Amino acid sequence: MKNFLTRQIKSNDISVLLLLYKTSKSVLKNLKNYKDFKVYILDQSNDHQLKKKIIKILPKIQLYKITNKNRGFAWGINFLTKKIKSRFFLCTQADVVISKKSILRLKKPFLIKKDTIISIPLIKNFKNFNLANNKGDKLVKVNKMIGAIFLSEKDRFNRIGKFDENFFFYWEDMDLSKRIENSKYTLYLNPMSKANHLGGQSTTQEYRNLFIKNLNFKFGEYLYQYKYNELRIVKIFRELIKIPILSLFCFITLQFKSSFKMLCYYLGILKFINFIIHNK
């Protein structure tokens, strides 16, 4: 079995999907581990200077599309999956650190578990199972993953419905995890594959970017809970009253970033209400 797996774990049937938006130059060094893979890139911030830097790092770029409109993470990854021809794709971000060896190890569940749809590495600071209950290199069934780094088989990703594009950024991975949990497929974690997600470093920390992130985090939270009948009307009214008060308090006490964050959350709730009104 070990020799069989060694022969099967190769890189030529894996495409790397990389979604960029206002990407910080400080994380570009992380991309060198993808140089042996075919890479498909979508930059939704119209950054032509960044492209010049990246093509020097990645020699096997198959697609590098630049747009001046940000249509979100879910839409962007779904778009890129339509372009690839390989059986597998690795969805990753610029602020993820993972070695080639760990990428290839993500194929193991697909080779020995017939119900695999997504394989994920052991991610530092992301706890989705108890390490103490696992021995050696045994694969672990898990019920959630993060969109920052995962390997999927293209056909099964299409069959499950891809990412729900109603989610702009955040919660689309939780939604996908929930749909997988309710399907015949399984998420597997290979503890022998390891990655580090630096978190929040894939984009610059400008107020515009923070606005997009925080607003859509709250929108995604409400949409997810609404989709799975977990959202209560009382929560909406409570937060519509509480959040503006908290924002004002933070502003008065000179906690300007916290005040701004609360304001973004409030607008995220309003975006959700508007979404529901126009989609009934």
Image: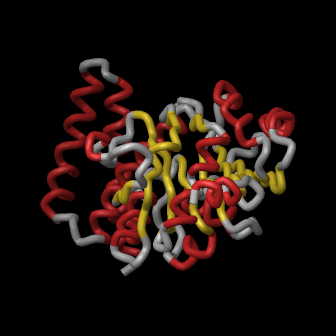
Furthest toward the top, the residue is 254
State the image coordinates of residue 206 (x, y, percent, origin top left). 55, 30
* Drawn side of residue 99 relative to residue 198, left or right: right
Query: At x 13% / y 60%, what residue is drawn?
Result: 234
State the image coordinates of residue 98 (x, y, percent, origin top left). 60, 38
**The one of 150 and 226 positioned closer to us in this rendering:** 150
State the image coordinates of residue 119 (x, y, percent, origin top left). 51, 57
Query: At x 44% / y 46%, what residue is drawn?
Result: 137
Residue 163 in view, yes or no? no
> Residue 87's image quarter?
bottom right
> Residue 79's image quarter?
bottom right
Number of numbered tags placed on the structure image: 0
**The one of 198 and 237 positioned closer to us in this rendering:** 198
Q: Quadrant of the N terminus?
A: bottom right
**The one of 231 and 1 positioned closer to us in this rendering:** 1
Query: At x 64% / y 41%, what residue is drawn?
Result: 101
Q: Is residue 34 above or below residue 162?
A: above
**Render colour scheme:** secondary structure
Query: At x 59% / y 31%, what residue is drawn?
Result: 204
Residue 81 in view, yes or no? yes
* Drawn side of residue 81 relative to residue 124, left or right: right
* Drawn side of residue 202 relative to residue 10, left or right: left
> Residue 126's image quarter?
top left
State the image coordinates of residue 140 (x, y, percent, origin top left). 38, 55
**The one of 136 and 110 positioned closer to us in this rendering:** 136
Q: Quadrant of the C terminus?
A: bottom left
